Amino acid sequence: MARMTDHLGRPVVAVTGIGVVTALGVGKGENWAALTGGRSGIHPITRFPTDHLRTTISGTVDFLPSSSKGASQLTYELAETAAGEAVLEAGIGGSDFGGPLFLAAPPVDLEWRDRFALYTASPASGTASERVRAVARELPSLEIFDSGQYGKIADRLAERFGTRGLPITLSTACASGATAIQLGVESIRRGESDRALAIGADGSVNAEALIRFSLLSALSTHNEAPEKASKPFSRDRDGFVIAEGAAALVLESLESARSRGAAVLGILRGCGEKADDFHRTRSKPDGSPAIAAVRAALADAGLAEDEIAYVNAHGTSTPENDKMEHLSLSEVFGARIRDIPVSSNKSMIGHTLSAAGAVEAAFSLMTMRESVIPPTINYDVPDPSIELDVVPNVKRDADVATVLSNSFGFGGQNTCLVLAREAV
């Protein structure tokens, strides 16, 4: 068999398995039916009290058993569920994956209930830290300790699926899921492995997270109609809706996939990234880092601007981010951007933070396979300053061969992926 390489002589990277969990449900089938049906997964928060909080809605995954067990346990269950679906579809042994693991996960810390439990059980004398340590030394297990260890989730996943080497856990803000995919792609291109497991997962919705994002004026306060709260690119958008979810991709060299007769679900053509140190939340006003990330992804894919058929937008529904994304797309694609479908999955699933880039890459692959573009719902008040075809409110049948999937994170973390239906 001839070696299958791209325009730069690197191994072509295929996707042979996809797994998804969001507030819309578990698995690709349930998610795709809801997504293309324009159904929102946003709802009032019931997991914890919301008294005195400005935002009382989210896209939590309360249907999972670990939803009440804290961010670490829930993120693990989300990641394991999505990875299980992806590995099964790829036809790889469930406990002997044989390639590296790249996990995008939220920063974790002790749950407040664990902090309070340690504190209230501590001796009466000594400093607070000394008292808590005294109790911790007598704990019968390491469960509380493990819940605050950032790498523990990936360690458990590596054991569960039999990945090889040291599992990598990463956080590049809201671009994390896309970064995990990029690292998997690069490991295959470098010849370090024939396959990689890339996962983005985030189960970190809690009161503290809502307070932090509220202090940044980043969250929607459209509490009275949760399903209407996420309004990407609309003039009346007022912030993002925090959510939970996960997606996993089995990445494999095209040569390896075909040699074992695996179904190829799509191709990872290109990855581009660019850092922006302008502000902790806002993007550089001229959009240059986002523009550079898009152009880097196109160059890495070996595609020209006129070869992109659809853009899966970052589309958070924050006034600043949507404006910046429109600016960057207009600069790269010129007047043609008015004719390219640009829709936002976040209008229905909310912003899944560390998982978002992976979730949206999974939906981008499904868009190409099913020839259906999911809509941007809640687009009732167009913003005259943002001239985009957002596929408003209703799905659209379309022959989509290439997708640009954008992830622009707080702190200037920008990662873009170019996906294709078939190898060239």
Image (cartoon, helix red, strand yellow):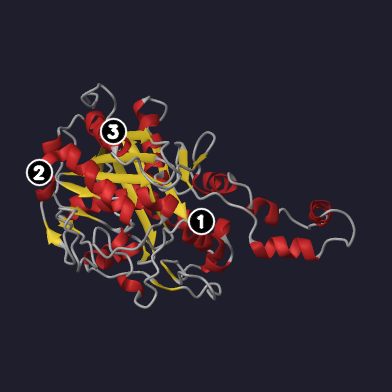
| Element type where label 3 sits in the image | helix
Q: Nearer the viewer, residue 351 or 303?
A: 351
Please report whichever mark, 2 or 3, sits nearer to the chain's N-terminal start: 3
Tell me residue 347's x, y (percent): 29, 62
Vertical placement of 423 versus 392: above or below?
Answer: above
Crowdedness near tag 3: few (<14), some (14–19) or many (≥20) residues, C-alpha within 10 Å: many
| Residue 118 placement (x, y as % from top left) | 76, 61
Observer-side mark, 1 or 3, equals 3
Disc number placed over residue 75 in the picture, else none: 1
First in sequence, mark 1 or 3: give its number. 1
Give left or right: position of 284 versus 129: left
Residue most toward the bottom? 224
Q: Is residue 374 left or right of residue 24?
A: left
Secondary structure type for disc 1:
helix
Q: Which residue is mark 3?
A: 292
Q: CA distance from mark 1 to mark 3?
A: 32 Å
